[in-house]
Image: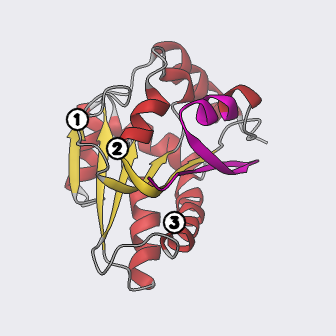
């Protein structure tokens, strides 16, 4: 059960959309145990990487709504332990969060941008991760953009967080409409871009 302080912070972020204080957000994320969730995500990414044909090239990962980079730490640590070469691109709209992650070397590339209008070429990434930010996708362009930037056979990974961590039916339908094949839809949404 979440404590009063964590609930107050959840309400703060949900109502103000103010992520400018990176230290405050990092404390909140740690209170929510998102660092532990990041290790779990890393294990899933490590597993999925075995199903992506790379022909010796490093695994290319994109995380949007990357915040202070806790997910990057968990994922890159797991991949490094397994000896999997990779590059990690973090994208967030909030410059202070990106700077926080960059100063702590939580990833390789840091891009300020909108995840409904990604500043990347088509078929650029093997794995796309997004933890949270479900409520910040007003224009309906999120899944088509995720599909566009993933390589054929690439995976979209979205762990469910919050008080009721389960994939909503409407979310699953949006993924399917965008052309993805849903692999898992429980406390994780994992989808694969079909081979073309």
**Residue visible at 42% across and 75% down?**
79
Distance, label 2 to label 3, CA atoms, is 17 Å
The correct choice, above or below, for 109 with respect to 161 in the image is below
In this figure, which residue is indicated by the disc labeled 1?
119
Q: Which quadrant is home to the N terminus?
A: top right
Name which of mark 1 and mark 3 comes first in the sequence. 3
Query: In the rendered structure, does residue 177 fall within the stretch colored magenta?
Result: yes
Name which of mark 2 and mark 3 comes first in the sequence. 3
Choose top left, top right, bottom left or bottom right for residue 111: top left
Marking on residue 45: 3
Choose top left, top right, bottom left or bottom right for residue 168: top right
The total of numbered circles placed on residues is 3
In this figure, which residue is indicated by the disc labeled 2?
149
Q: Nearer the viewer, residue 94 or 28?
A: 94
Name which of mark 1 and mark 2 comes first in the sequence. 1
Indicate the position of residue 83 as horizontal and vertical percent values. 38, 86
């Amino acid at each position: 059960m979440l404590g009063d302080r964590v609930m107050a912070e959840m309400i703060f972020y949900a109502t103000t959309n103010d992520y400018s204080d990176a230290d405050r957000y990092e404390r909140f994320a740690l209170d929510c145990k998102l660092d532990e969730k990041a290790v779990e995500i890393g294990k899933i990414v490590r597993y999925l990487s075995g199903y992506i044909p790379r022909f010796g090239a490093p695994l290319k990962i994109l995380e949007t709504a990357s915040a202070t980079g806790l997910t990057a730490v968990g994922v890159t640590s797991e991949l490094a332990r397994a000896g999997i070469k990779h590059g990690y691109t973090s994208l967030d709209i909030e410059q202070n969060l990106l700077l926080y992650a960059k100063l702590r070397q939580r990833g390789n590339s840091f891009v300020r941008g909108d995840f409904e209008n990604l500043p990347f070429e088509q078929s650029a990434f093997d794995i796309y991760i997004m933890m949270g930010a479900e409520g910040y996708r007003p224009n309906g362009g999120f899944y088509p953009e995720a599909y566009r930037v993933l390589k054929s056979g690439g995976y979209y990974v979205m762990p469910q967080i919050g008080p009721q961590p389960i994939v909503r039916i409407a979310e699953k339908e949006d993924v399917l409409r965008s052309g993805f094949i849903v692999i898992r839809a429980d406390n994780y949404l994992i989808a694969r871009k079909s081979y073309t």
